[in-house]
Amino acid sequence: MDRRFIGAMLCYAALAILAGFTLSGVIRIATWVFLGGIALKTYIVVLKRRAD
């Protein structure tokens, strides 16, 4: 695996954990959905680059 990919995923996970501890209600869920979308987009880009 690429170090940059792993680093990005670790950053997304850390932000999600921080959001879980500091936010509440709808804004927490919205933050998790947003971070999940960015993580998914990052994963798709990595898969596309490997296929090329």
Image (cartoon, rainbow, N blue to C red):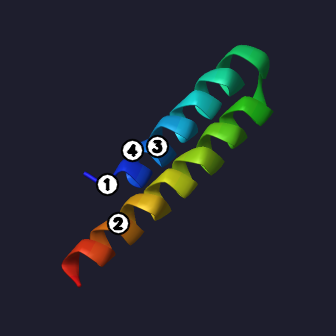
Amino acid type shown at disc 3: Gly
Asked which secondary structure carries label 2, the reply is helix
Residue 6 bears which disc, if any?
A: 4
Asked which secondary structure carries label 3, the reply is helix
The label nearer to you, 1 versus 2, is 1
Task: For the residues labelled 4 and 3, say whether their Cβ atoms are less than 8 Å apart.
Answer: yes
Relative to 50, is 12 above or below? above
At horizontal 39% and vertical 44% (from top left) the residue drawn is 6
Task: For the residues labelled 2 and 3, say whether their Cβ atoms are less than 8 Å apart.
Answer: no
At horizontal 31% and vertical 54% (from top left) the residue drawn is 2
Amino acid type shown at disc 2: Val
Task: For the residues labelled 1 and 2, say whether their Cβ atoms are less than 8 Å apart.
Answer: yes
Residue 7 bears which disc, if any?
A: 3
Where residue 25 appears, x then y in whole percent? 77, 25
- Distance of mark 1 from mark 3, alpha carbons? 9 Å
Q: Residues within 10 Å of mark 3 (few under 14, many from 20)?
A: few
Task: For the residues labelled 4 and 1, say whether their Cβ atoms are less than 8 Å apart.
Answer: yes
- Distance of mark 2 from mark 3, alpha carbons? 13 Å
Where residue 7 appears, x then y in whole percent? 46, 43
**Residue wearing tag 1:** 2
**Residue wearing tag 2:** 46
Q: From the viewer's perspective, tell me whether residue 51 is left or right of residue 37.
A: left
- Distance of mark 1 from mark 2, alpha carbons? 9 Å
At horizontal 64% and vertical 33% (from top left) the residue drawn is 15
Mark 4 or 2, nearer chain start: 4
Amino acid type shown at disc 1: Asp
Relative to 9, is 52 above or below? below
Quadrant location of residue 48? Answer: bottom left
Mark 2 or 3, nearer chain start: 3
